[in-house]
Amino acid sequence: MALLELKLLIVAQIVIDLIILALFFYLMRRFRSVRQGAMAGKWAELFEGLLSDADRVADEFKTQLEEKHRLIRRLNEQLDRRIISLNLLLNRSHVVLSSLRDKGDGAPPMPLSIVNQQAEIIKMASEGHGTEEIAKALSIPEGEVRLVLDLRKKLSQWDEKEREV
């Protein structure tokens, strides 16, 4: 919805710019046709006032657009982090359920906390272990290992972009 509002604001700004441009050309024609003198001075004052108002409005609009862009970027990052957490929880529940079905004794294994598991995945990957090997060692799906490693790479890229901004 915010993206739609942003697009509408951009379209509105373009329409306003086109109207100002048309008004500029209209006033320039009128200005040329009017003889030099008192009338020309009035037209010039009117034109200057319109241009300064248009410039002020454009600056305010630009500031608002930049702020909305920053807010949308932050919301997207927060949403991505929540989606990551949900995916990890879903994968973990899948592993626990499948291990319960396989064992049949009803006692679920003690899984690592999400943070510890992520740290262990990253540590094992940095030691050169493959995703399949990490998944077997930690009793988690291979897709979860790939997800954690890909997300770590993506988050480090975001951090680099944030430092640049």
Image (tube, grey):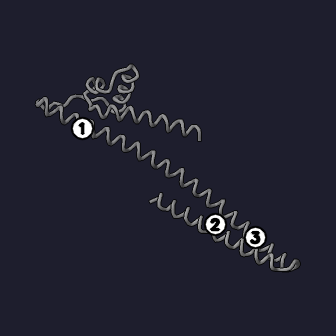
Q: CA distance from mark 1 to mark 2?
A: 55 Å
| Amino acid at the residue labelled 3 | Gly
Q: Label 2: how many residues lie within 10 Å, few (<14), some (14-19) or many (20+)? A: some
Q: Which residue is mark 1?
A: 93
Q: Which residue is mark 2?
A: 17
Residue drawn at 51 percent across, 64 percent down: 8
Q: Is residue 118 above or below residue 41?
A: above
Percent coordinates x, y for residue 74 in the rendering = 49, 47
Where is residue 19, by image quadrant? bottom right
Earlier in the chain: of badge 1 and badge 2, it is 2
| Amino acid at the residue labelled 2 | Asp
Earlier in the chain: of badge 3 and badge 1, it is 3
Residue drawn at 57 percent across, 37 percent down: 163
| Amino acid at the residue labelled 1 | Ser
Residue drawn at 40 percent across, 36 percent down: 151
| 3 or 2: mark nearer the eye | 2
Q: Which residue is mark 3?
A: 49
Kindly give the residue lying farthest to the top in the view shown. Answer: 127
Please name whichever residue, 111 or 63, is drawn nearer the observer in this view of the structure: 63
Where is residue 123, by image quadrant? top left
Q: Disc number at residue 162?
A: none
Q: Horizontally, is 44 left or right of 121 in the view?
A: right
Percent coordinates x, y for residue 159 in the rendering = 51, 36
Q: Label 3: how many residues lie within 10 Å, few (<14), some (14-19) or many (20+)? A: few
Marks 3 and 1 close (CB-CB < 8 Å): no
Q: Quadrant of the N terminus?
A: bottom left
Kindly give the residue lying farthest to the left in the view shown. Answer: 104
Q: Label 1: how many residues lie within 10 Å, few (<14), some (14-19) or many (20+)? A: few
Percent coordinates x, y for residue 61 in the rendering = 61, 61
Where is residue 152, by image quadrant? top left
Q: Is residue 90 above or below residue 1?
A: above
Q: Secondary structure at mark 2?
A: helix
